[in-house]
Image: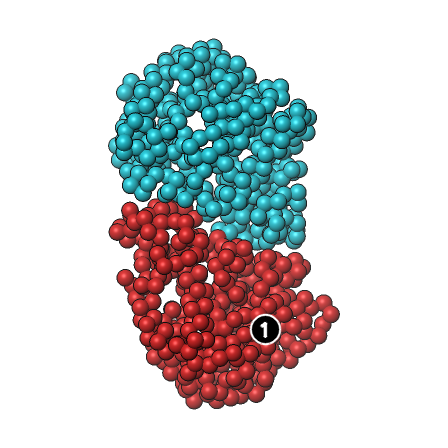
Chain colours: A cyan, B red
Amino acid sequence: MYKLLKKDGNARRGEFTTVHGTVQTPAFMNVATCGAIKGGLSSLDLKEIGCQVMLCNTYHLHVRPGDDLVYDMGGLHKFTNWDAPILTDSGGFQVFSLSSLRKIKEEGVYFNSHVDGRHIFMGPEESMQIQSHLASTIAMAFDECVENPAKYEYAKQSCARTERWLERCKAEMSKLNSLPETINKNQLLFGINQGATFDDLRVENMKKIAKLDLPGYAIGGLAVGEPKEDMYRIISAVEPHMPDDRPRYLMGVGTPGNIIEGVWRGVDLFDCVMPSRNARHGHLFTKKGIINLNNKKYERDALPIDPECDCPTCRGFSRSYIRHLFKCQEILAMRLCVMHNLYFYNNLMAEIRCAIEEGRYERFREENVEVLDKRI
Amino acid sequence: MYKLLKKDGNARRGEFTTVHGTVQTPAFMNVATCGAIKGGLSSLDLKEIGCQVMLCNTYHLHVRPGDDLVYDMGGLHKFTNWDAPILTDSGGFQVFSLSSLRKIKEEGVYFNSHVDGRHIFMGPEESMQIQSHLASTIAMAFDECVENPAKYEYAKQSCARTERWLERCKAEMSKLNSLPETINKNQLLFGINQGATFDDLRVENMKKIAKLDLPGYAIGGLAVGEPKEDMYRIISAVEPHMPDDRPRYLMGVGTPGNIIEGVWRGVDLFDCVMPSRNARHGHLFTKKGIINLNNKKYERDALPIDPECDCPTCRGFSRSYIRHLFKCQEILAMRLCVMHNLYFYNNLMAEIRCAIEEGRYERFREENVEVLDKRI
């Protein structure tokens, strides 16, 4: 499924083939929490801004509209009108970050819905069943994402439980994929590496889960408040133990600089709500750094957000106009800005792929890693 | 400028040519209050849903971002990235409906901004200057839109003042169009018929303003709460006194049924916030009547909003998906629904034009006038 086309240092240029099409990697997955990108973008817009993979949140969709409804409507692809790959997370991260009254047991997690307080139980089997209903291309394993900073003993214990959960996920997914009523019988399960910020736990965990021979592996539990040096150190520690012939996904990361560093260390896939969330507040990426469109100096600025950008927003609209829309609370402001920031990310990945292909990724990294994250 | 192509009863099929392109009439103008359609539509979307004329509100743009800013940015066409005709209203209607502490004098109106309470004066000259700054294709005369119901004596007095204001508008517009710094030196001024619900005042006023030989005429002060029979009676009373060779615009109207009746009585142009406002609440037009997408019965409905519709929304998305987006307060819900309702209106006008061309407007009216306004 994953074909390595070229290596430049540790950076990998690859192709990841699924039943819903081939993903050119490294790639950034665009987050559509409830089946739509926040800011008013539809699946038609995603095609226009170069999105390859849409990421939906299992927890949110389970709570509303319910995975049984999405199943009845033919799965997420039909429901959202998106025919390319979709990745669903396991629900675990939101269970731990959004819901209240959690009780973690060997069988899974008991918690209350953040929408209506209703009692919900989710374990590995339930997560797989929900994701099978949603019929995404890639399902993520159900794991515990421990808080940062974590105590060593707790992290070790949690890690061991997450490993046991992963075996249950694999068994359940295999069962679900063989059922006649399953929409996507080729649903892929990705395992998730955990171990908080402890290198020995991380490496031990990675070695164990690699043996399960899953179609892809993620590094989870990072970008939760730890210094970025810790993140980079952990990636470098774990990466040598990840199978070469499977895609590697760094969950919830990050800034353009984080992504450039992740690719540099051998990561293929990324996702983050930051570009769309920042866009909705007028914080916008450009090739020269991050601008804040609320700044008075853009009031009569006839330039597009980024004069070097070819996105639909920059081809048609000025900083002055979009700033005006923000002041009038017109939702078109958010839409135009989210379009721009996601295009910026998708285009960054295209440039990264090109730099790897041409064997000049080291220079690309040096020229961009700090500039792109800087507020100007 | 206006060419009558065909008459079918009183219904007129025409072409209205401006410096920003030709409008096929009858036409519906799509309301972009602050320079953007509420619901997240950009000028690029308007092209896709068959919009011919964009309507912007002078009062709103004067208050924010300021007509001087729009002028500095090259006028509304450049600012909004819309190259087809734009009509601006005079600001009068909003001064009377939105602002506080109004004082109406012979010279104009003193009022407070609804945004920051700032004192503003607007008279005929100021309205023309602002609209000239905005550089719209069509500027509307500054008038008083009296409340409904109005006393006869007040309506008569107000009407006479509005006539004096119209002469001042014409003189000012002619002056502005001859200034070298004016962006659109071909800006067209439309006169507005007033007279509340009194036929004699309406007819007398229309006869007077017709003599000013303006490029177009509107019927104002209707759709402000009076019974629709009054509206239709007044249109029929005024219409014979409107010049044949100029476009006629019924301001702020209305439902599909109102528009069908307006065309039947010889009207060429319409505008209304209702289709976009209703869309934002999930009230949607179909060829069988109006549906409310919040209704539980659409929860698992895989059909598009209107199975007979070819709009971008109906080509890609189900009632079930859009209803889900409303429940999650995703703004994509509003966007998809506004796209649909405005497409419905623009397409209704195309069908009306076709029916007139083919001499079957009477049948078209009978078949649609009640059905389209009915809640189903």
Residue A208 image point, x, y percent: 41, 12
Q: Chain of mark 1?
A: B
What residue is shown at x 53% (from left), y 88% (from top)? Answer: B208
Crowding near the residue tagged with mark 1, few <14, some 14–19, many ≥20 C-alpha atoms within 10 Å: some
Q: Examine the image and state in which quarter residue B166 appears.
A: bottom right
Circle 1 sits on which residue? Answer: B17
Q: Please give the name of the residue rendered at 38% of the width and 69% of the height, measured from the top-left corner.
A: B256
Q: Answer whether residue B21 is visible to the viewer in this image.
A: yes
Residue at 51% x, 51% y is: A332
**Quadrant of the frame with the C terminus of chain A:** top right
The quadrant in which residue B293 appears is: bottom left
| Image vertical order of residue B197 relative to residue B311, above or below | below
x and y percentages locating residue B33 in the rendered image = 51, 62
Residue A55 coordinates in the image, percent (x, y): 44, 35
Up-down relation of residue A28 to residue B272 (above or below) = above
- SS at badge 1: strand
Residue A364 lies, in percent from the top left, at 66, 28
Name the side, left or right, on which B56 lies relative to A83. right
Can residue B97 be seen in the rendering of this structure? no
Foreground pick, B113 / B283? B283
> What residue is shown at x 41% (from left), y 49% (from top)?
B316
Judge from the rendering whether residue B59 lies leftward or rightward of residue A19; answer left or right: right
Return the residue nearer the eye: B233 or A329.
B233
Q: Residue furthest right?
A: B180
The amino acid sitting under disc 1 is Thr
